[in-house]
Image (tube, helix red, strand yellow):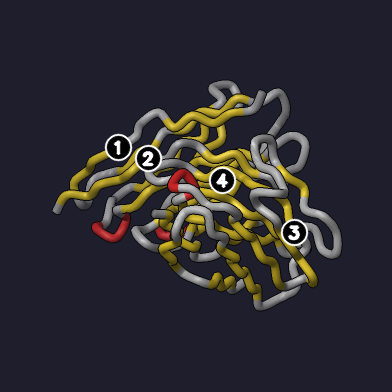
Amino acid sequence: AQSVTQLDSHVSVSEGTPVLLRCNYSSSYSPSLFWYVQHPNKGLQLLLKYTSAATLVKGINGFEAEFKKSETSFHLTKPSAHMSDAAEYFCVVSRMDSSYKLIFGSGTRLLVRP
Amino acid sequence: SAVISQKPSRDICQRGTSLTIQCQVDSQVTMMFWYRQQPGQSLTLIATANQGSEATYESGFVIDKFPISRPNLTFSTLTVSNMSPEDSSIYLCSVVIAGVYEQYFGPGTRLTVT
């Protein structure tokens, strides 16, 4: 069965320090992977996607993620956190039966301290 | 990208009643989906809205409870029928544009059932 696990429900960082949001997936095939961000009372926004091309994926707002097949991981990073990065982040994997159907992780709430 | 609007943005309803949520996209899309986000939870796929035919429901969701229509390529409705407090959630529609392997989400409809 396919699944995606976000290892931290909450992550707190100081402004200007690096961000690491961890995600592991389980799949018997090579899935597509995504990171979405949800700001309070706002819709979901796609940060970046991996679709079997380059393993290091660059997204919007300085975020990037690296697909590591051997570790079945797709961690999200950013070199320097900004106050506006405070939000809920979802790691998402495509389903085997339909690549357009998505399985969402439980989410990681990122807090940025001034 | 696509601009997606949902109506209403929020509503408070009494148990036993029904609410129809509309999703409108500014361009023709190949696929439309409906998701539910229960309070403090991640997103769960309810169904795929198929143009001109019956929606395809995920396990745990049935047409009698969540009837869906999609009369054309840019519009869909989701009805939450015979509501109970457990239906209090954010309901989001999402779309896939032909040739673009990305899924865009609407702003969501926040439903509270009392």
Question: Left of B106 or right of it: where is B63?
Answer: right
Q: Residue at x 52, y 45 (%)?
A: B43
Q: How crowded is mark 1: few (under 14 residues within 10 Å), some or many (20 or more)?
A: some
Q: Which amino acid does label 3 sit on?
A: Met
Of B19 and A37, which appears nearest the observer?
B19
CA separation, marks 3 and 1? 33 Å
Q: Distance between the residues labelled 2 and 1?
A: 5 Å
Picture disc at residue A34: 4
In contact (CB < 8 Å): disc 3 and disc 1 = no
The answer to whether the residue labelled 2 contacts the one labelled 1, judged by CB atoms less than 8 Å apart, is yes
Give a yes or no on whether discs 3 and 2 share a subunit: no
Residue ID for mark 2: A108
Q: Residue at x 64, y 36 (%)?
A: B60
Q: What element carries label 2?
A: strand
Label 4: few (<14), some or many (≥20) within 10 Å? Answer: many
Q: In this view, does B86 lie to the left or right of A84?
A: right
- For marks 4 and 1, give the CA distance: 19 Å
- Residue at image position (79%, 70%) is B71
Q: Which amino acid does label 1 sit on?
A: His
Residue nearer the viewer, A99 or B17: B17
Of tags 4 and 3, which is closer to the observer?
3
Question: Which chain is mark 3 on?
Answer: B
